[in-house]
Image: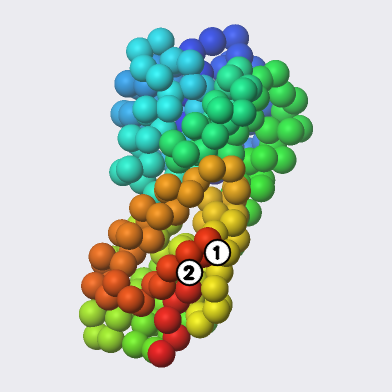
């Protein structure tokens, strides 16, 4: 696995990179946000939020806007709840507070990558009315028209399609798509609005006020 380690403390970076390499990973290191942005494609980014040239949260948001597939774990000394919430809202898949053990970090890496693998495993297609989802290729068709979705939009639609016709609570959608129930309500609403726009059918994803959302089954 290709790992991008973004850490400006050279001592920490050296020790962490060595531990990751011993576990069979290919590791690229960056000490600034600028270096990280130019690092090229990787499977996982371990991101310190305290960088000398730019706040790590803004880098996380930028990376996530351009790449829905990369796994991102924030690795930082910022341990307050509001910081964890901000990191997850910025697009991180998980949040690890320093100091931490390598065993904990490895377990979190494995958990994040397992979730990613489950999202991409081969499965039969889902069909709901004129809507068809190829869960392996992550492609969607509405009738004869292909609908191009981001990774999160696809995961949201898949979570709704698997329970088509029934209300899926907001907390369940947050857990299925973002692996958290902390905050995230606005993020969910924004993704639902984007999904409706791309499906070009505002009534296909129905809002059940105070509960969640439902994919119309007929």
> Quadrant location of the N terminus?
top right
Instruction: Give left or right: position of 148 versus 69.
Output: left
In the rendered image, the vertical position of residue 188 relative to residue 137, given as above or below? above
Question: What's the residue at 50%, 32% (across, down)?
Answer: 87
User: What's the CA distance linking mark 1 and mark 2?
Assistant: 6 Å
Quadrant that contains the C terminus:
bottom left
**On the image, numbered disc 1 is attached to which residue?**
211
Q: Residue at x 23, y 80 (%)?
A: 145
Tell me if label 1 and label 2 are in contact, CB under 8 Å.
yes
**Which image quadrant is residue 41 in?**
top left
> Residue 217, how many percent across, how many down?
45, 86
Between 11 and 172, which is closer to the camera in this rendering? 172
Residue 44 appears in the picture as rendered: no
Name the spot of residue 74 as percent of width and height, x first. 54, 30
How far across and down, in percent of the image, does residue 179 sit?
59, 50
The count of marks equals 2
Q: Which residue is mark 2?
A: 208
**11 versus 135 height, above or below:** above
User: How busy is the neighbourhood of tag 1: few (under 14 within 10 Å), some, or many (20 plus)?
Assistant: few
View extreme (front): residue: 209
Q: Nearer the viewer, residue 153 or 207?
A: 207
Horizontally, residue 51 falls left or right of residue 183, namely: left
Figure check: 189 above or below 54: below
Residue occupying image coordinates x 33% and y 60%: 193
**Left or right of 77, for residue 70:** left
Q: Residues within 10 Å of mark 2 (few under 14, many from 20)?
A: few
């Amino acid at each position: 696995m290709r790992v991008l380690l973004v850490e400006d403390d050279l001592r920490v970076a050296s020790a962490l990179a060595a531990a990751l390499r011993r576990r069979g990973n290919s590791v690229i290191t960056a000490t600034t946000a600028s270096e990280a942005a130019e690092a090229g494609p990787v499977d996982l980014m371990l991101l310190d939020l305290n960088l000398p040239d730019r706040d790590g949260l803004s880098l996380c948001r930028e990376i996530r806007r351009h790449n829905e597939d990369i796994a991102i774990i924030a690795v930082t000394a910022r341990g307050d709840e509001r910081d964890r919430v901000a990191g997850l809202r910025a697009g991180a898949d998980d949040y690890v507070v320093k100091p931490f053990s390598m065993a904990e970090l490895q377990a979190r890496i494995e958990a994040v990558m397992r979730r990613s693998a489950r999202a991409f495993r081969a499965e039969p297609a889902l069909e709901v009315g004129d809507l068809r989802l190829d869960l392996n290729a992550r492609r969607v068709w509405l009738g004869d028209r292909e609908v191009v979705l981001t990774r999160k939009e696809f995961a949201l639609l898949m979570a709704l399609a698997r329970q088509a016709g029934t209300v899926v609570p907001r907390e369940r959608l947050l857990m299925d798509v973002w692996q958290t129930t902390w905050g995230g309500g606005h993020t969910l609403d924004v993704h639902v609005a984007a999904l409706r726009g791309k499906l070009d059918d505002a009534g296909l994803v129905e809002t059940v006020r105070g509960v969640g959302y439902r994919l119309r089954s007929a």
